[in-house]
Image (tube, rainbow, N blue to C red):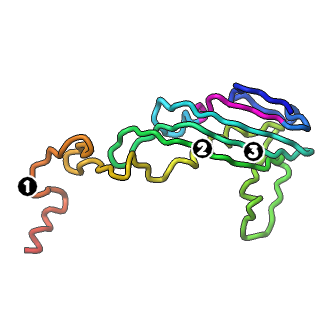
Amino acid sequence: MACIKGFDITAPVLLEDIPREGLDLYYDDVASVLRESGLPDGQESISGEAHLSRSAGTVHLKGRVDGRLVLLCDRCLERYPLDVSHSFSYLLMPSGAQRFKPELSLSEEDVDTTFYDDDVMPLQSIFREQILLEIPIRGVCSSGCKGLCPGCGENLNTSSCRCASGEASGPFSVLKGLLD
């Protein structure tokens, strides 16, 4: 089995590069695939592993990502770390092998299948997808995060609100007089 450590995630892996006994790739920095994803700058290192084995034109991929992401809290907008550790597997097939079935539902095998063009394995996009799938929809720095004051924007985790303690003013404060 061929093994390459410190492989560059942006380097293409061709079908012909995968020996029959398989190919193990170890990536030191997979975080570079996240540059245009909208995540904050200064991402920490994320390592990745890929084991590729082939049979004719079909390639089996078993992979893993491990590391730490830096995200922005959705409540207080402060940076916080998120540990990522995830294993995945795919069946990679040539794009000409796409078979459109009249089925209305997908099997688990269909979900874990992706296609490649020109004998180039889409590892960069697969690793990017797997990392992004680990990010929560609503990420918070802690369960007790108080967020920002809606009036003055002060981070309520680090200081108290600077708003006047009187009546809250806003576009709907005029309607309050209707209740009296």
Neighbours of disc 1 within 10 Å: few (<14), some (14-19), many (20+): few
Residue 13 position within the rendered picture, expressed as x and y whole percent measured from the top left: 78, 33
Q: Which residues are magenta?
A: 23-33
Q: Which residue does the numbered mark 3 point to in the structure image? A: 62
Task: Tell me the quarter of the image containing the N terminus.
Answer: top right
Q: Foreground mark, 1 or 2? A: 2
Q: Identify which residue is drawn at 71% across, 42% down.
A: 63
Q: Identify which residue is drawn at 44% across, 53% down.
A: 138
Nearer-the-camera pick, 15 or 158: 158
| Among the 4 quarters of the image, the one containing residue 3 | top right
Q: Which of the numbered marks, if any, corresponds to residue 166?
A: 1
Q: Amino acid at mark 3?
A: Lys
In the rendered image of this protein, does residue 52 appear above or below residue 17?
below
Residue 106 position within the rendered picture, expressed as x and y whole percent measured from the top left: 73, 65
Q: Secondary structure at mark 1?
A: loop
In the rendered image of this protein, does residue 99 appear above or below residue 118?
below
Q: Which residue does the numbered mark 2 point to in the structure image? A: 85
Q: Amino acid at mark 2?
A: Ser
